[in-house]
Amino acid sequence: MQVRPARVALRVVRSACAAAIILQLAACPGGVMPGAGRATSTDTAQRLARSGDHAGAARAYEQLATAAAGAERDSNLISAGEEWLAAGSRADAARVAALIGTGLTGEAKERRGLLVAELALANSEPERALGEIKLLGEPTTLAVARRFYDIEAQALFGVNRSADAVRALMQRERWLSDESELRANRWHIFESVRDAAMHGASITPPPGTDAVVAGWLELGRVGLELSRNPFGAAERVNDWRTRYPTHPGQTSVLDQLLRSYTADLEYPPNVALLLPLSGRQQAAGAVVRDGFLAAYYQHTTGLRPRVRIYDVAERRAEDAYMAASADGAQFIIGPLTKDEVAAVAAVADGRIPVLALNFLPDDAHAPRGFYQFSLTPEDEARLAARRIVADGRRRGVVLAPAGDWGNRVTGAFTEELERAGGSVIARRAYDPQENDYSPEITGLLKLDESRSRQERLAATLGSKLEFEPRRRGDAEFIFVASQPSQARLIRPQLRFHFAGDLPVYATSDSYEPDAQANLELDGIQFPDMPWMISSDPVSAAVRDSVQSAWPARANRRGRLFAFGFDAYRLIPLLKDSANARVESIAGMTGRLSLDANGRIRRDLDWVVMRSGQPRFISPTVSAAPGSTTSN
């Protein structure tokens, strides 16, 4: 059929109009047209920010920006970028920052510079953040000064200039006059030094450091010891108090620290430990027990509780619970497996607090005083999904082992990714007993389709063609669920199959310490617990002492060892069911907190493998409000 020129011209006009509309949408922050959607106001955006809904506040500021121009538009875009960062979405913050005008002056220029510096920090680029800070000069307003010195300090910690970082935080005090603000700033200095040390920053005072700065650095070390291993830190606290008698941290920090950690060491007299110490789960139960006892023996002799251990492989878990109750237990740890935890929950009456070492199903009722602590890989899969979206990636593929474990991890990952606005566009299951995963990888990346097209074309032309297959172009990441031996095979096979540039995310199950064997893992990103990846001196000292006493178990099943260690630490925080509190404990298995459902949640650090070693990257992605865990 012949197409008339007039009709062709009409189609061109329509296409041009459609393209113009698309470009206009893309130019608007968040893809929102001016005036589109529900009307908003600055008060609405500020209220959302104060309530903790930072993503909602960011969207509100973006909508305000679409209806404004000039300085007002830029101000709203800066606020949107700040709120996106607070929400943990670096990609959205970067998208908005790119829309902000460059001819800014005054406070707007400072705020934009701070936003760009924060983005650099979020992308693990402290040197670039320092460069942005230097371009700004000294701050000119209180609101800017609060953020300016904090961002400068984070960047300085990131390049191992800890003494200069403390000086930057001390500079904030020039802008504060209220006594409560001064105390809050000093607590912030302490926490900043402690947290930097947790992530491997050197906090040893350089020669010639003045006493106040040196005192803050050494107090950060004391805080690190109290956080990771409070049982043996009393001597260090007293030593610091003697050496720095007039230091500003004496009253504003140390007293608060001692009140908190003294309460954390008040144990009930009788504790029961319910674990499988024979049968199929014997190995796992023994490692958890040894980790528990490692913490127990770190505790001062006169303050330790009496511990009685029950083997739930010799009797039913619910019978062990009843026996512990009859024997006078005032706190019960365990059992370990899901079925055993459910059995104990069914008979627990709330009189004795229980810390179960696994999660009940989401729809199961937990009785009063029944707490749950687990190292479930599903939680890590959800963390990975949120991290991926925060990194600006939405569409990706999943490679997981066949079977129940792979299905559970994939299900949790997919559910959380979709909740965050992403999607899994393909999934393949591999046999973990095999060594060659080429069929699964080529199918996942559509390399097999590329080769089929080449073969058909060659057959049609009747000649051999020079050909290099192309992987699919719609995948922005690959999520790999695996154990270490499979991960070391999968990563090089992805490179071989033209996916070396595709970002790879995983759970901590893919990693175990072995620098030589882990050279193949370079580039993989995953969350893990401090016991496995932290290089801070306190964690290293605890690991060394444990490995000297239990070398085989501590090396082979380190995560379960840390699990038992932290279980012991949690007892005094949960012993009073009416006042149970776990707000933010820097445990060996992660930063621990207690949610409204009685579950201990773990916030983990993120690392990327480089030269066979895990290297810390930007801050963790915390558990999303209202998130659930499937088991």
Image (tube, rainbow, N blue to C red):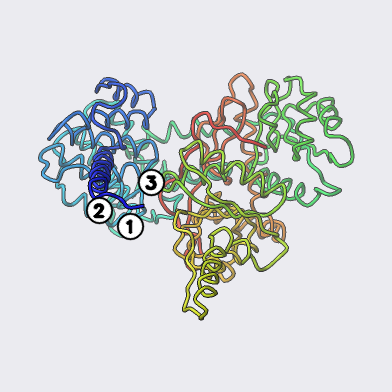
Whole-angstrom CA distance, mark 1 to mark 2, is 9 Å
Whether residue 239 is visible: no
SS at mark 3 in the image: helix
Whole-angstrom CA distance, mark 2 to mark 3, is 18 Å
Q: Residues within 10 Å of mark 2 (few under 14, many from 20)?
A: many
Q: Nearer the viewer, residue 319 or 597?
A: 597
The single residue placed furthest to the right in the displayed view is 314
SS at mark 2 in the image: helix
Percent position (x, y) of residue 12? 25, 47
Amino acid on which the number 3 mark rests in the picture: Val
Amino acid on which the number 2 mark rests in the picture: Leu
| Residue in the picture at 31% in, 37% down | 30
Which of pointers 2 and 3 lies earlier in the amino acid sequence?
2
The disc at residue 193 is 3
Percent position (x, y) of residue 428? 62, 54
Q: From what the image shows, is residue 400 above or below residue 576?
A: below
Percent position (x, y) of residue 307? 76, 37
The residue singled out by tag 2 in the image is: 130
Is mark 1 in CB contact (under 8 Å) with mark 2? yes
Q: Is 94 situated left or right of 476 in this image?
A: left
Q: Residues within 10 Å of mark 1 (few under 14, many from 20)?
A: some
Amino acid on which the number 1 mark rests in the picture: Val
The residue singled out by tag 1 in the image is: 159
The single residue placed furthest to the front in the displayed view is 1
Q: Residues within 10 Å of mark 3 (few under 14, many from 20)?
A: many
Q: From what the image shows, is residue 19 above or below residue 492?
A: above
Q: Nearer the viewer, residue 114 or 589?
A: 114
Residue 321, quarter of the rendered image: top right
Which of pointers 3 and 1 lies earlier in the amino acid sequence?
1
Q: From what the image shows, is residue 554 above or below residue 331?
A: below
Which of pointers 1 and 2 lies earlier in the amino acid sequence?
2
Q: Nearer the viewer, mark 3 or mark 1?
A: 1
